[in-house]
Image (tube, rainbow, N blue to C red):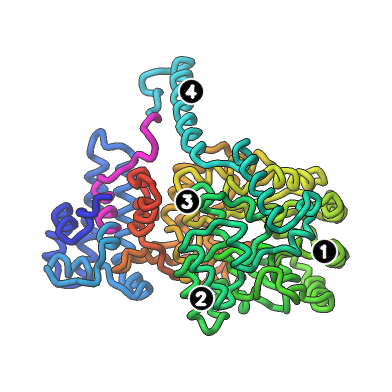
Amino acid sequence: MDLSLYNREALIRDNPRVFALARECRGKSSLRSKLTKLFSELEVEASREEGLPITARARIRDCGQVLGNMLQKRSDELAGFSLAQALLDLARDVPRPDLTPPFYADLYHILEGMQGRGSSVALEDVYVTPFDQLSGREAAIARSDQLDRLRVEVDRRISRFTSGLEPEAIERRRQRREAICRILGASEVEWQDWRWHIANVVKDQELLERLVRLTPEESGALQEARKHALPFGATPYYLSLIDDEPGLRDGAIRAQILPPMDYVCQVAATTDTATLDFMGEEDTSPFDLITRRYPSICILKPYNTCPQICVYCQRNWEIDDAMASGAFAGMDRVEAAINWIREHPAIHEVLVTGGDPLAMGDGAIRAILSKLAEIPTVERIRIGTRTLVTMPSRMTEELADLLGGFRQPGKRMVAVVTHVQHPYEITPDLVAAVDRLRQRGIPVYNQLVYTFFVSRRFEAAALRRLLRLVGIDPYYTFNTKGKEETISYRVPVSRLLQEQQEEARLLPGLERTDEAVFNVPRLGKNYLRSGMHRDLLSILPDGSRVYEFYSWEKNISTAIRTYSTSDVPILDYLGRLEAAGENVSDYDTIWYYF
Ligand code: SF4
C-alpha cells in the first residue's frame, strides 16, 4: 500500500480546486455552499467530456453526493464530528493532530472519485462489450468468448479456497478423526453418534491442546478467556476440521471458536454483561423466551446453549458455556411462550432457535413442535441450528423424520436455517445431513456472517457456489455490526457492498440468492443492497465512516427511527488483508462503495 498518499500534503497537493475554494471560505456554511456548487460543476464538466467512461461519470456523481451529505450540519450533529471544519482547518494550515492516515486515505479517494479519477476496474478488463463493432451471431460469439474468459477468471479465484469435499481434505480429516478418537478412546460407532459428541464437548484447554495444535497467541487468549469464564467449547467433530498446522486454509474455523486476545480483554472488562446485548433483545422481548421485531415472525428460544460456541455470537452474553446444564428453559416456560404466540395470530412464522435447539433430545424437540403445530395461524416453523456444521451426525434419520412429520404442504412449512461460514466447513457428513432434510421436503437456508476471516476476494462466492451444490440456499449475509468487542472480526460495509457487486454478481442467480444486511439494534434488518436505506454521515478522524441506518419500516411509516454507528476504517481493514498476504490493489474499488 502506498501510505505516502495518506497525509495532509498529498491531499492538498492532489486536490487544488477543492482546497483553493476552501481557503476562500470564512466558515462552514460558505464552505458547504461553495463545495456543493463545485460538485455540480464537476458533474456538468464530466457530462460534456467526450470519451469519459460511464463508470467515471457515475463515480463523480456518487462521490459528489456523498461529500455533499457529509458536509451537512445535521451530519456534524449526528456524527459528533465536522468534516467541513476539518477541510477548513486543513486548507488554512490549522494543526489537526487528530486526523490519522485512515482518515486521509478515505477522503483522498472520495475526492479523487469526485474528479473522475481512482481505480474502477475490479477484475482484469476482459469485459469490453463487442456490440459497437459487431452485430448478430458474430457479436454473440465475441461476447460469449469474453464471458468465457470472465468465468475462467472467477473459477481461478474461487479455486484458491479449499473445500471440505476435496479428496485431500477428506483424507486429512480422516487422519484427524483417527487421532482424536485415539486420544479420547472413542470407537468409530461412538464418533458417528451425536450423543457421544455432546457428552465429549471439549471445554478444557489442556485437553483441547492435546487434540489441536494452537499458536502461542491462540493458547494465551484462550487461557485468559477461561480465566474470566467466557463461554467456550467445540465438538470433537468440529475440532477434526482444524488442520494440524495453523494456516490460512483453516483460519475461518479457528477464528470461529478461538477468541482473540482483544476480544477477551474487552469482554472480561465488561462488568455488566447486558451491555453486550448489542441487538437490544431485552427491549424486544414482549414475553419470556420470545423476541419480536417484525409483524409476522417471532423468535422462540427454548434452549440457550450450543455444542460449539461462536466467538462473535450475538447471544453469547446470555450463554453460560458450551452445553451448560440448565440450558433448557423447561416445558412450563416454553408452553407459556407458545400460548403467547397462540394469542397473537398475526404471527405466522416461528423461528425456534437459541442457542441451538437441535442440541436437545428428540423428545423435547417433538414436544415443542407439537405445541406449535397446534396453532392454526403458525404457517411456518423455522429451526435455527448450526449442528449441520458442528455435529452433522445429529441429523439422524429419526430426527429428519420427526421434523418432516410436521410438514403439511399447503398448510404448514418446516424449514431449517443453518450457519456455514466457509467452504472448508462443508464435508461429506454435512452433505449427507442436508440431504436427509431435503429428502423430507425440508429446505435448508444459510446465514453467513461476513467476518474478516471470510472476506477475501471470492471467498464468499466460493461458499455460495458450494452451498447451492450441496442443497443449501444462501439466505442472508450479515455485516458484523458494531459490537466493539468483536473488532477483529469486523469488515467495513464498503467491502460487503463491493463483494456483492463485484463477486456475487458474477455468480448465477440461483447461487446469489442471499441478501446483504446490517442488523440494526432493536429495529431489525437493514437491506444493504439499497443505498436508499442508509446515509453516509461522516468520516471520523480515525478513518471510520459513520452511517445512519433507517429501520425496515422506512417506506411504510413516517414515525421511524434511525440508528447511527461508526464502521471499521477501510485502510485498517486493507492493512490486515495485506498482512494476511493479500494483494490489496486487488481491492482498490472498495473506497467507492458507500
Ligand atoms: S451456533 Fe449460533 S447461537 Fe450458537 S454460538 Fe454460534 S452463533 Fe451463537
Is 169 or 545 nearer to us in this picture?
A: 169
Q: Which mark is residue 361?
A: 1
Q: Earlier in the sequence, mark 2 or mark 3?
A: 2
Q: Amino acid at mark 4?
A: Ser
Q: Residues within 10 Å of mark 4 (few under 14, many from 20)?
A: few
**Mark 3 C-beta closer than 8 Å to ligand 1:** no
Q: Earlier in the sequence, mark 2 or mark 1?
A: 2
Res. 417 visible in picture: no
Q: Earlier in the sequence, mark 4 or mark 1?
A: 4
Q: Are marks 3 and 4 in contact (CB under 8 Å)?
A: no
- The correct choice, above or below, for 45 with respect to 270 in the image is above
**Mark 2 C-beta closer than 8 Å to ligand 1:** no
Q: Residues within 10 Å of mark 2 (few under 14, many from 20)?
A: many
Q: Amino acid at mark 3?
A: Ser
Q: Which residue is mark 3?
A: 455
Task: Tell me if residue 115 is in the magenta stretch.
Answer: yes
Gap between marks 4 and 2, in whole Å?
53 Å
Q: Earlier in the sequence, mark 1 or mark 3?
A: 1
- What element does badge 1 sit on? loop
Task: Tell me if residue 285 is in the magenta stretch.
Answer: no
Is 525 or 249 nearer to us in this picture?
A: 249
Name the residue located 79 percent from the left edge and 65 percent from the top edge: 360
- What element does badge 4 sit on? helix
Q: Amino acid at mark 2?
A: Val
Q: Amino acid at mark 1?
A: Gly
Q: Which residue is mark 4?
A: 144
Gap between marks 2 and 3, in whole Å?
24 Å
